[in-house]
Amino acid sequence: MNKRLIATVIGCACLTLATAAEARTSYDGSWDLLFVTQRGSCDSTYNFSVNINDGIVTHPNLVKFTGHVGRSGAVHASVTVHDKYASGSGKLTGDAGRGSWSGHAAGGRCSGYWTAQRTG
C-alpha cells in the first residue's frame, strides 16, 4: 500500500512540474524598455530589451537581474551592475507598460519612470 501511495505522489508531482513548465502568460515575448531619470545624477535615459517567458523577465547580458510579471500584468524587477542598483514596479497591459523606478549610481540616488513596448 505504501509503495502505491508513493508512486501516486511522485506521478502527481511530475504532472504538476510538466504543467508548470508549459505555462505561458499573455506577456511572454520580447519587450523594449525606456528608463527616464527625473531626479538624481543618473544618465538621463537608459534603453534595453528584455524577454518574458512564463512570467519571468530576463536579460541575456545582465547576471544580477530579476523580474517577474504576474497574471494581472503587475511587474517587479531589480538589477545590479557593478556599483549601480535599480528596482522598479509597474504594469503591463496588452503590448505596452509603464511604471516607476529608483536606485543609486556613483553614490547618488536616482528615480524616474519607465515605459515598455512589446516587440515580439
Image (cartoon, helix red, strand yellow):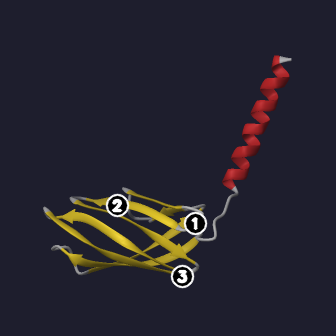
Query: Residue at (50%, 76%) from the top-left corner?
Result: 31
Q: Is residue 11 left or right of residue 87?
A: right
Residue 71 image position (x, y, % from top left): 60, 63
Q: Pointer 3: residues within 10 angstroms few (<14), some, or many (20+)?
A: few
Identity, as a three-letter code, of the amino acid under mark 2: Val
Q: Is residue 54 left or right of residue 107?
A: right
Residue position for label 1: 72
With respect to residue 11, does 33 lie above or below? below
Residue 25 image position (x, y, % from top left): 63, 65
Q: Residue furthest top?
A: 1
Residue 17 image position (x, y, % from top left): 69, 45
Residue position for label 3: 119
Q: Is residue 109 left or right of residue 87?
A: left
Q: Quadrant of the N terminus?
A: top right
Compute the Cα span from label 2 to label 3: 21 Å
Identity, as a three-letter code, of the amino acid under mark 1: Ser
Q: Earlier in the sequence, mark 2 or mark 3?
A: 2
Q: Pointer 1: residues within 10 angstroms few (<14), some, or many (20+)?
A: few
Marks 1, 3: nearer the viewer: 1
With respect to residue 18, does 1 lie above or below? above
Residue position for label 2: 79
Identity, as a three-letter code, of the amino acid under mark 3: Thr
